[in-house]
Image (cartoon, grey):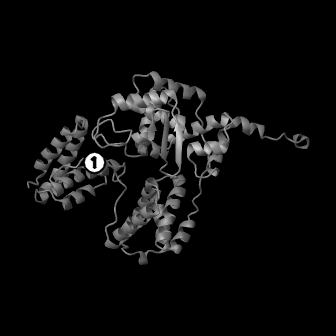
């Protein structure tokens, strides 16, 4: 097999064109291929998986001297295509989640540990998104240990746990540490390191409790009207936005939604939620049902064997990858509707759905069922957006305090 970069370039580009990739995307691949050729040429001229791994590890931008997520994404996806051709003789076109999950540990002990951790999470039936979050932070810690020259957990003292979280502040906001700590504790308990749990607790990460934002009725009307009539908004994007705005579905549930989950006769959607594993049946308002039908019948790419409702609008026509895909859709829809002063992710749209139910005097247990909360305590936070009822709870100032 010819393994020169020139030959592999021709094979990969032909596969991309056959799969209807946009020429701009193919151009980006070709730019990275030229960089790979420059890397491989002085090292024998023949591409190997080992050279590909070395190339993919060049994530530091020479211009800024800092880690580049764009570099990692471009280099990693190209190497994956080259390696798939070396293994099978075919270019395997798949899509991955943004960020790629970060670096992987290299030592045998750490790799085996991650495999055991992932198997344990799967056996316990944790949601896919939860397993990904727990696995990402665990891999990050083990990679951090390797960077410190530590290749065994027995040599990892409490200082490594606090040092690891200090290193995260280069990429994460301090306000996000609470969630990273929460995702990390289960792994530490799995490996039986109570001392590291105690060390992590010393960080003092606190969960923030901001007053939840609300979406005004005027903005809701503008978005709904744009979804109904604007030629600039595709049926897919309108359906995704309306689905989140009207039902409060989480992004992971919108991504996982399958054609069999929709009952067109009674206009309902029935699914088991990814996060809580709770079943839920939601009504489809007329506009939402119409946009979903328009998308499925006229706009959705034909893809044999792909049962997810929402697919990528460009090749490869597979299911949407992650939360960022949904955010891009909703943010673009809001922008085209002229609503640009909010961050229009599904979190905001869930809050909007909950606030409308509250204003309609819907009981909290019903709201919890609609939003798919496993506990009503999760729903109580939405009381912060019910301004009228909060005002009614205000007590008058005593006469003595006024003087």
Looking at the rendering, in which quadrant would you find the C terminus? Answer: top right
Q: Position of residue 101 (x, y in %)?
A: 37, 55
Secondary structure beneath label 1 = loop
Q: Residues within 10 Å of mark 1 (few under 14, many from 20)?
A: few
- Outermost bottom residue: 154
Residue drawn at x 20%, y 62% as measured from the top left = 50
Q: Is residue 265 above or below residue 196?
A: above
From the viewer's side, name the closer residue of 215 and 255: 255
Disc tally is 1
Looking at the rendering, in which quadrant would you find the N terminus? Answer: bottom left
Left or right? Give the position of 80 relative to 4. Answer: right
From the viewer's side, name the closer residue of 239 and 51: 239
Q: Position of residue 378 (x, y in %)?
A: 61, 50
Q: Position of residue 274 (x, y in %)?
A: 47, 50
Left or right? Give the position of 179 relative to 13. Answer: right
Q: Which residue is mark 1?
A: 94
Q: Is residue 219 above or below residue 120?
A: above
Q: Is residue 343 visible?
A: no
């Amino acid at each position: 097999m010819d393994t020169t970069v020139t030959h592999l370039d021709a094979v990969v580009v032909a596969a991309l064109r056959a799969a209807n990739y946009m020429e701009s995307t193919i151009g980006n691949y070709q730019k990275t291929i030229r960089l790979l050729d420059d890397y491989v040429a002085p090292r024998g001229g023949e591409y190997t998986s080992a050279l590909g791994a070395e190339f993919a590890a060049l994530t530091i931008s020479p211009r800024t001297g800092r880690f580049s997520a764009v570099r990692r994404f471009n280099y990693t996806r190209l190497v994956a295509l080259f390696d798939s051709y070396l293994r099978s003789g075919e270019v395997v076109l798949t899509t991955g989640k943004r960020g790629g999950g970060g670096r992987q540990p290299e030592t045998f002990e750490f790799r085996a540990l991650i495999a055991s951790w992932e198997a344990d999470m799967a056996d316990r039936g944790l949601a896919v998104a939860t397993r990904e979050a727990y696995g990402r932070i665990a891999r990050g810690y083990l990679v951090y240990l390797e960077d410190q020259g530590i290749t065994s957990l027995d040599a990892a003292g409490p200082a490594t746990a606090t040092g690891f979280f200090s290193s995260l502040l280069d990429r994460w906001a301090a306000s996000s540490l609470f969630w990273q700590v929460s995702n990390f504790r289960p792994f530490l308990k799995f490996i039986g390191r109570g001392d590291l749990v105690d060390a992590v607790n010393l960080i003092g990460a606190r969960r923030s409790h901001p007053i939840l934002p609300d979406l005004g009725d005027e903005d809701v009307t503008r978005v709904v009207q744009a979804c109904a009539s604007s030629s600039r908004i595709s049926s897919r994007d309108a359906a995704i936005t309306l689905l989140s705005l009207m039902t409060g579905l989480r992004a992971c549930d919108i991504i996982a939604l399958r054609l069999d989950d929709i009952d067109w006769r009674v206009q309902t959607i029935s699914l088991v939620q990814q996060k809580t594993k709770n079943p839920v049946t939601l009504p489809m308002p007329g506009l939402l049902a119409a946009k979903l039908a328009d998308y499925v019948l006229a706009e959705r790419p034909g893809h044999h064997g792909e049962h997810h409702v929402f697919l990528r609008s460009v090749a490869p026509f597979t299911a949407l990858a992650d939360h960022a895909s949904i955010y891009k859709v909703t943010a673009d829809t809001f922008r085209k509707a002229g609503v640009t002063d909010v961050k229009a992710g599904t979190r905001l749209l869930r809050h909007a759905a909950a606030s409308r139910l509250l204003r309609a005097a819907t009981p909290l247990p019903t709201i919890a069922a609609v939003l798919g909360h496993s506990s009503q305590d999760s729903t109580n936070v939405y009381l912060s957006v019910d301004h009228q009822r909060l005002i009614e709870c205000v007590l008058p100032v005593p006469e003595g305090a006024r003087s």
